[in-house]
Image (spheres, grey):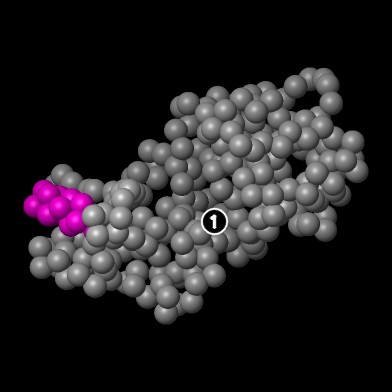
Amino acid sequence: MGQLRVVHCPVNFAGIAWRRQAVQFRALAKLLPSTDVFHFYFGLTLVPKRIQFPILKAARKKSVFHFVGSDIRGKSPDELAYGRLAGAQIVGSYDAARWIPEAEVVPPGIDLGAIAPVLPRADGPLRIAHAALSRRRKGTELVVAACDELGLDLDVIENLRHDEVGPRLARADIVVDQLNSGWYGLFAIEAMAYGKPVVGYLHDEAVTRTAAAFGVEVPIVRTTKETLATDLRTLARSDEERRSRGAAGRTYVERVHDADKMADRLIDIYSRL
């Protein structure tokens, strides 16, 4: 395969609609001659889909739709049928593949070289970390209640820049992810990269398919709203289980979420368009 020029788009354009559209048409005209693959995010294109894909086809250009989860979750097959206009569709997990079964799965990648695992503390009260980007969606009040019941220190991480989250994760002994959506996101990925045991709610089928695809078990301690306090108590009582889960988490992200490996998966998809 020769060198491919891939453009990831669109970016956000500010301004009123007609002016924004004019800017995007100019961007497409500029990119078209020198681009081999247009990699679209969030179900958006540079210009309206009804003309975007005829233009790409006429110019013999390839395209990919890359969905991040919130842009497809809960939508019907008819609402998502436009994805087939592209040469390939990508989702970030086997859980998201419920909505687009034919999509390729490329999990989010992070720079693991920038995150060193942090060894568990030898003493002091256990500290639980939880990110409350949306308290309702994350089940934050249930996490607060469980920690109160068990007498555990809780660090609720919210309203911070991304670069401020890492130090808080590094100080945690256990990380509680979401209790509603059925899969994990960047917060849990980074927690595992730090070698922290993670607790969260996961859908069975996605866990099974992920393990089969990557040859490694998903190490997150699986819980539900009803069992969170019990599962936290069990993990809090076992130093060995926390160490084991933390080490398994780092191994898992090295296999499944390493940015370089995920880039290779993208390149493979591009080569098959």
Q: Magenta segment, which residues? A: 21-36
Quarter where residue 89 is shown: bottom left
Identified at 84% across, 26% down, the residue is 125
In front of the other: 14 or 133: 14
Query: In the visual, does 6 lie left or right of 219?
Result: left
Identified at 50% across, 72% down, the residue is 75
Res. 100 in view: yes
Quarter where residue 187 is shown: top right
What amino acid type is highlighted by mark number 1?
Answer: Thr
Res. 221 in view: no
Identified at 91% across, 43% down, the residue is 149
Residue 35 lies in the magenta-colored region: yes
Q: Secondary structure at mark 1?
A: helix
The residue to which callout 1 is attached is 210
Query: In the visual, does 267 lie left or right of 245?
Result: left
Query: In the visual, does 141 lie left or right of 111?
Result: right
Structural crowding at the residue carrying mark 1, measured as other residues with C-alpha within 10 Å and reported as few (<14), some (14–19) or many (≥20):
some
Residue 230: give x, y in percent of width and height.
Answer: 86, 49
Residue 74: give x, y in percent of width and height.
Answer: 54, 70
